[in-house]
Image (cartoon, rainbow, N blue to C red):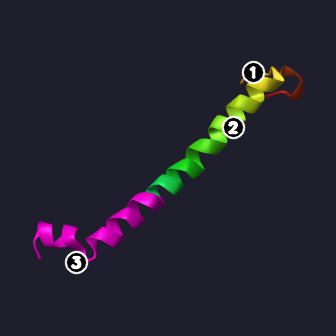
Amino acid sequence: MSFMEFLDMGGYAGFVWPAYLITAAVLIANLLLPRIRHRRQRKSLGTRDRKDPTTGG
């Protein structure tokens, strides 16, 4: 099997590669969006990313 045959996916490349791309986009979004939302929430509350001295952290 050549690399081009692999990329062609037996004639199903038009269905397979977009499915992989959509899946990758969703996984990346699931990693990044909560972090972005967390930072925005902390900023809106006026807190900083540092340890609280009262909790011993």
Query: Foreground: 47 or 26?
Result: 26
Q: Residues within 10 Å of mark 1 (few under 14, many from 20)?
A: few
Find out whether residue 30 is within the magenta segment: no
Magenta span of residues: 1-23
Q: Is residue 51 visible?
A: no
Left or right: 33 as drawn, with respect to 50: left
Q: Amino acid at mark 2?
A: Arg
Q: Is residue 5 left or right of residue 42?
A: left
Q: Which residue lies under the disc numbered 2?
A: 37
In the rendered image, the vertical position of residue 39 relative to residue 26, given as above or below: above
**Mark nearer the N terminus (2 vs 1):** 2
Amino acid residing under circle 1: Arg
The percent position of residue 17, horizontal first and vertical second, equals 33, 65
Q: Nearer the viewer, mark 2 or mark 1?
A: 2
Query: Within the image, what quadrant is residue 9 found in?
Result: bottom left
Give the Cα distance between marks 1 and 3. 53 Å
Mark 3 vs mark 2, foreground winner is 3
Quarter location, residue 34: top right
Crowdedness near tag 3: few (<14), some (14–19) or many (≥20) residues, C-alpha within 10 Å:
few
Q: Give the residue at x 14% y 73%.
A: 5
Image vertical order of residue 30 relative to residue 41, above or below: below
Task: Give whichever of discs 1 and 3 has the lower sequence position.
Answer: 3
Q: How many numbered marks are there?
A: 3
Label annotation for residue 11:
3
Amino acid bearing label 3 = Gly
Specify the principal SS of the magenta part. helix
How far is disc 3 from disc 2 in space, using C-alphas?
A: 41 Å
Quadrant in the picture for the N terminus: bottom left
Q: Please tell me how crowded label 2 is: few (under 14), some (14-19), or many (20+) other residues with Cα within 10 Å.
A: few
